[in-house]
Image (spheres, rainbow, N blue to C red):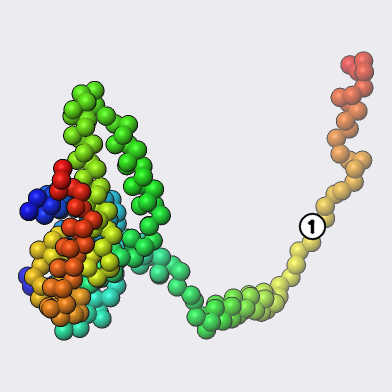
């Protein structure tokens, strides 16, 4: 029948279209991408967060404790902060100086 | 390598086995998708979506049916969802194609006329297939685009062979009714 031939021709034409050979590669890439997102976006359990916070506090306390244990003699150095002994800038600003 | 062996390998983490499985079935999935969307780009999108879904739910595949039956079922679902989601876009594309076919006339009027006639014929057939009721359309596409037997279609659509036969007969009648004007040409 003529109509069936029209329909069959149309379907045959559509079936001649070949799928892109890279579809499989694209699917695998998408799966990897989704896996990465899943790993990255995974929520961290509360106990892990608590352990991290506790270890930071522990390290700070240990640092403070160790620092307080150090006792030695301190040497003092006198520093001259008398302005009068600094270089006299007038030497450069006085007019007609020779 | 059989489907069962490939599935076993995939489940143990072998992605190369999944590539082999995809390469074995991608053209079939693509044909069915083409039957629903009639566009290479859209059919490829559906093919990708189908295989991603297969990979994600392969663990739930119980091997009570053939893998191909399960795959075709997923393909039907994805295609139907895609058509529903892009309904508005397809209406616009259809209208656009109609206008393009009017503007793209060649200088030789006879060739242009023939070309226009062929385009119109294809458009009418596409519209008639797309206008088939859900189950008739599914059965028709599986039968014509994949040349599956009524038994295979029945297994995919989870119905009886008799029901599939009825669906195909009704689909054929619907198409004859909708495309009667083409026979006169």
Between B184 and A37, the one lying in front of the other is B184
Q: In this figure, what is the number of numbered marks?
A: 1
Between B171 and B43, the one lying in front of the other is B171
- The reply, left or right, for residue B5 in relation to residue B10 is left
- Residue B21's quadrant in the figure? bottom left
x 21%, y 45%: residue: B121
Q: Quadrant of the N terminus of chain B?
A: bottom left
- The reply, left or right, for residue A85 in relation to residue B92 is right
Where does residue A50 sit, x and y in percent of width and height?
Answer: 56, 81
Residue that badge 1 annotates:
A77
Between A93 and B24, the one lying in front of the other is B24
Where does residue B125 sit, x and y in percent of width and height?
Answer: 22, 52
Q: Residues within 10 Å of mark 1 (few under 14, many from 20)?
A: few
x 92%, y 18%: residue: A95
- Residue B184's quadrant in the figure? top left
x 24%, y 70%: residue: B135
Which type of secondary structure does the marked residue at label 1 adopt? loop
x 22%, y 26%: residue: B109
- The reply, left or right, for residue A76 in relation to residue B93 is right
User: Which chain is home to disc 1?
Assistant: A
Q: Can you see residue A29?
A: no
């Amino acid at each position: 029948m003529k109509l069936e031939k029209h329909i069959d021709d149309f379907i045959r034409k559509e079936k001649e279209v070949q799928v892109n050979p890279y579809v499989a590669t694209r699917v695998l890439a998408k799966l990897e991408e989704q896996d990465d997102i899943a790993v990255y976006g995974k929520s961290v359990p509360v106990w892990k967060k608590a352990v991290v916070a506790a270890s930071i506090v522990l390290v700070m306390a240990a640092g403070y404790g160790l620092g307080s244990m150090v006792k030695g003699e301190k040497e003092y150095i006198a520093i001259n902060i008398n302005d009068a002994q600094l270089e006299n800038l007038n030497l450069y600003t006085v007019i007609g100086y020779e | 390598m059989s489907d069962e062996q490939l599935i076993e390998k995939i489940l143990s983490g072998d992605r190369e086995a999944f590539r082999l499985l995809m390469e074995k079935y991608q053209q079939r999935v693509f044909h069915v998708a083409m039957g629903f969307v009639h566009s290479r780009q859209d059919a490829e999108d559906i093919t990708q979506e189908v295989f991603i879904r297969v990979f994600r739910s392969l663990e739930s595949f119980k091997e009570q049916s053939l893998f191909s039956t399960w795959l075709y079922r997923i393909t039907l679902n994805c295609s139907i969802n895609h058509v529903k989601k892009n309904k508005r876009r397809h209406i616009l594309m259809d209208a656009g194609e109609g206008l393009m076919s009017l503007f793209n006339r060649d200088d030789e009027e006879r060739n242009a006329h023939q070309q226009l006639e062929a385009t119109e014929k294809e458009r009418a057939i596409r519209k008639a297939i797309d206008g088939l009721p859900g189950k008739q359309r599914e059965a028709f596409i599986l039968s014509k685009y994949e040349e599956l037997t009524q038994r295979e279609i029945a297994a995919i659509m989870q119905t009886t062979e008799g029901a599939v036969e009825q669906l195909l007969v009704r689909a054929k009648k619907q198409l004859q009714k909708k495309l009667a004007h083409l026979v006169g040409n």
